[in-house]
Amino acid sequence: MDKQDEIEGLAILVRDLRKHKNVTLNELAERIGRSVGFLSQVERGLSRPTVADLTAISEALGVPTTYFYNPGHPRAVRWVTRPDERRTLYYAGGITDVLASPGMAGGFAMLESFLEPGASSGEGHLNDSSEQGGFVLEGELTVWYGDAAEAVTLGPRDSFQLPPHAQFRYANLSDFPTRVLWVFT
């Protein structure tokens, strides 16, 4: 799939899940603190949510964030995933996530995140129900965790692990691209 197909695929997943859960655009907008207009644009593929937006949407609709990474087409080997078989999410804020796991039915899922220079997960803290960790493959990842005012900047081969419902946000404050391997339970 190309980038526009991936964006439209996410739009359909968000809209169909919201309708399946019998939640109006107004109700969802209130739950996540965003406008109805913004959500309408996301559901039509006209705007891209930030990582924080999609996390808030998944929590508000009662699904893990990895729900939105459902592959668009079947793989040749069920337990293997190849680069051309992976689902990609293009977020606002300069972050692209690629589902590296062959599936999401197991005990964990893996994502490869690409952060452009200046990219951010969003203004607010994430509150994901899954435990997660990351391994910085290249570049720098700055993480704000909990109530700590100071951020921690991680470099290549540094890793971190956060409990479920950890309040955090992250960004690439460097002038170079960053790649991170994320693991979610």
Image (cartoon, rainbow, N blue to C red):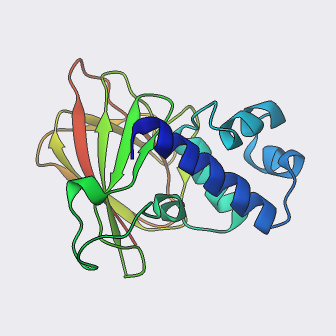
The answer to whether residue 134 of the structure is visible from this angle is no
74 or 19, nearer to the observer? 74
Give the x, y percent position of residue 156. 12, 42
31 or 91, nearer to the observer? 91
Q: Is residue 57 above or below residue 110?
A: above
Q: Is residue 46 above or below residue 1?
A: above
Q: Is residue 107 left or right of residue 57?
A: left
- Which residue is pictured at 62% across the width and 59% down the height? 58
Q: Quadrant of the C terminus?
A: bottom left
Q: Is residue 4 above or below residue 62?
A: above
129 or 100, nearer to the observer? 100
- Which residue is pictured at 23% across the width and 34% down the height? 178
103 or 152, nearer to the observer? 103
**The image quarter in which residue 80 lies:** bottom left
Q: Is residue 18 above or below residue 106?
A: above
- Which residue is pictured at 85% across the width and 65% down the height? 22
Q: Is residue 81 left or right of residue 163?
A: left
Q: Is residue 94 left or right of residue 84?
A: right
Give the x, y percent position of residue 129. 55, 66
**The image quarter in which residue 81 lies:** bottom left
Give the x, y percent position of residue 86. 32, 57
